[in-house]
Image: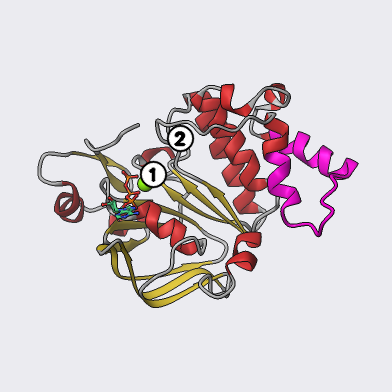
Amino acid sequence: MKSVETSGLTVRLNGFEALSNVTLSLNHPTFTAIIGPNGAGKTILLKTILGLLKPQSGYIRVMGLDPTKEPKRVRSMVGYVPQRDRTSFFVPMKTKDVVMMSRLVWKRPPRWATEYDENVVKKVLRIVGAEDLADRRFDELSGGQQQKVLIARAIVSEPKLLLLDEPFNGVDVRSQYEITNLITSLKESGVSIVMVTHDVSDVINLIDNIVILYKRVIAAGRPEDVLKEDILKSVYGDRIRICSYEPCLMFIPRDSHG
Ligand SMILES: Nc1ncnc2c1ncn2[C@@H]1O[C@H](COP(=O)(O)OP(=O)(O)OP(=O)(O)O)[C@@H](O)[C@H]1O
Ligand SMILES: [Mg+2]
């Protein structure tokens, strides 16, 4: 079983080719990190996996389904933590309702929350360390607090595949550690994880695969096979610092907006 499989995937947006001929095959369940410079198409790839963007050509299957034909079914199996940029969302709702909404959306109308649903929401907020934020307005939370709530929202519907777009952006080290533990336990319970990140050092010992994306797949495979000096320099330029971090090479990217 594959969580994500693509072949020759090309995505154009307003005439701009964001992804060209992307071919990928990720086993299920595995933990994959996607890295690549700003503008490489990482977010576009996640949105294409979710069926939010339609490819112009190529093949794509997500948990065996075609997101261009069955986007709802795909989304019911996939949790998504979007990239949180500087513009914070205006969501005049309580935090617990933001999380609950993502659970209720898959129910038949009328979408009443049961006591069980309420307990699940409490539980996931506790897991991400945000239980004390439950009754606060989501758009009044700090950036890092919002990030944790977005992770709770993505896992509350018990996805088979979890897509995370720079989840550590603006998150303090302690919370990074907690989120990493959470991801590890999700993987152990059979969930596939695809995480876009600018810094793989946080997760280097946990990931099965790494994909370097720069409009197309520059390299993909086990970290020790992909994190090579020549590959990294071809993508990030000559001036990055590369250091050894057994069994891989690590690098300090300069395009991070972390
Ligand atoms: N709606 C759009 N119309 C035209 N071009 C777009 C659109 N959305 C994104 N792009 C372009 O597609 C490219 C890839 O964008 P994407 O957001 O996937 O980059 P990214 O790899 O996630 O970068 P970052 O690390 O900065 O988040 C960028 O050059 C971007 O300007
Ligand atoms: Mg992005």
Given the image, on which type of amino acid does mark 2 rest? Answer: Phe
Residue 86 image point, x, y percent: 40, 30
Q: Is residue 54 left or right of residue 185?
A: left
Q: Residue furthest right?
A: 115
* Residue located beneath label 2 in the image: 168
In the image, is residue 79 part of the stretch drawn in magenta? Answer: no
Give the residues drawn in magenta, as a range: 99-126
* Residue located beneath label 1 in the image: 197
> Residue at the spot x=40%, y=59% of the render?
45
- Look at the numbered disc 1 and give the secondary structure of its residue: loop
Residue 66 image point, x, y percent: 53, 75
216 to 180, vertically: above or below: below
> Mark 1 Cα within 10 Å, few/some/many (few <14, many 20+)?
many
157 to 147, vertically: above or below: below
Q: Residue furthest left?
A: 238
Residue 215 image point, x, y percent: 26, 61
C-beta proximity under 8 Å, tags 1 and 2: yes
Q: Is residue 141 left or right of residue 173?
A: right
- Look at the numbered disc 2 and give the secondary structure of its residue: loop
In the image, is residue 116 part of the stretch drawn in magenta? Answer: yes
Given the image, on which type of amino acid does mark 1 rest? Answer: Thr
Residue 107 image point, x, y percent: 78, 57
